[in-house]
Amino acid sequence: MDERKPRPGLIGPLMLITVGVLLLLNQAGALPWRVWGILWRFWPVVLILIGLDILVKGSRSLLVYIISLLVAVAVLGGVVAYTIHQSRQDTSTWQAISTDSLREGRQDADRGDVGLRFGAGTLAIGALSDSPSFVEGTIEYGQYSAKARKDFGLKDGRASFSLEAQSPSLPGSIPGLNIGDRWDLNFTRRIPLDMSVDAGVGKVEIDLSDMKVAEFNLKTGVGEVMVTVPAAGQTRASIDLGIGSITVLVPHGVAAEIDVSRALCTVRVDKRFVRSGDVYETSDYHTATNTIELEITCAIGTITVR
């Protein structure tokens, strides 16, 4: 009877080592979190590695095993090296291919709903200074981007605004090209808003400090997120991130209760928030006028609250 010891697999150990090294560099601050937004575009490499794994397990030849191992290391190493190189490129070289301007009047609305679905790139949200508009802003499109779909309506004194990124014409485009969008949106500070943001990959900066936001929900896949919560009023909010970093700024004078749910996330919280399990709370939360009730969920990355 021909019995042979099975060859150890390739894909499992290599993937674990690669992911572990990248996460270590992320945590040490030596590598930006946007590396994961570039890396996911190379998902077909996983199929190559699986094929090599099957080839190795079905062969008795030590030479085949060694060659397959070298090929797997070379392919995976090349992908990672290219991804790291691209993630460290200066993003200031990004250039818009086309630009749209946004402006919608508030009219007689006394409340508003905002729904945003952002694909990849940079998203910035802030407050209008002194304007009768409901929203003003610009959308800059990168290479291969499709025009975003906008909708605005007013019913029974409630304004509703939605903006949705459309799929790029070449979704498998090679990282390093002039891809992704830049949205710079400013909303009224005169009426209360409920805001929901769904972002894919990239950098998200949201400053709600001068706005009246009763409900705020942010969900993003991969990237860097910075949110400044409202400085006045009572707000309920949630932030859900797959891979990356979350920074939450709570203005002084705002009492907070923050519930953190994490898998492989490092948590850093300012000392003015008292910890009880996974909940961080200011001492005056139950008596203060201006409050934020926040839930943060993170799979892999860092959470900073200050």
Image (cartoon, rainbow, N blue to C red):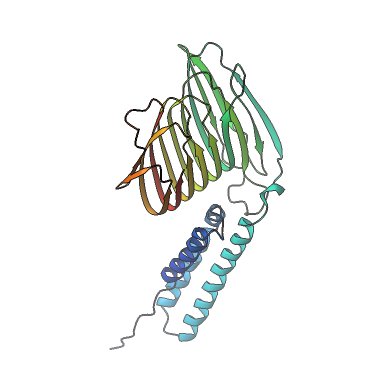
Name which residue lies at 34% across and 84% down. Answer: 5
Q: Is residue 31 above or below residue 252?
A: below
The number of numbered discs placed on residues in the rendered structure image is 0
Q: Residue furthest bottom?
A: 1
Q: Quadrant of the N terminus?
A: bottom left
Please give left or right for residue 253 compared with residue 151 in the image.
Answer: left
Q: Is residue 285 above or below residue 157?
A: below
Front residue (pair 219, 190): 190
Horizontal and vertical percent position of residue 96: 70, 40
Name which residue lies at 53% across and 36% down. Answer: 206
Using the rendered view, name the quadrant where residue 9 is placed: bottom left
Using the rendered view, name the quadrant where residue 58 is placed: bottom left
Name which residue lies at 56% across and 64% down. Answer: 80
Horizontal and vertical percent position of residue 163: 55, 30
Please give left or right for residue 44 compared with residue 286 in the image.
Answer: right
Front residue (pair 168, 101): 101
Horizontal and vertical percent position of residue 119: 55, 41
Name which residue lies at 65% across and 43% down. Answer: 144
Q: Is residue 242 above or below residue 53?
A: above
Horizontal and vertical percent position of residue 48: 50, 66
Please give left or right for residue 285 compared with residue 224 in the image.
Answer: left
Q: Is residue 215 above or below residue 110?
A: below
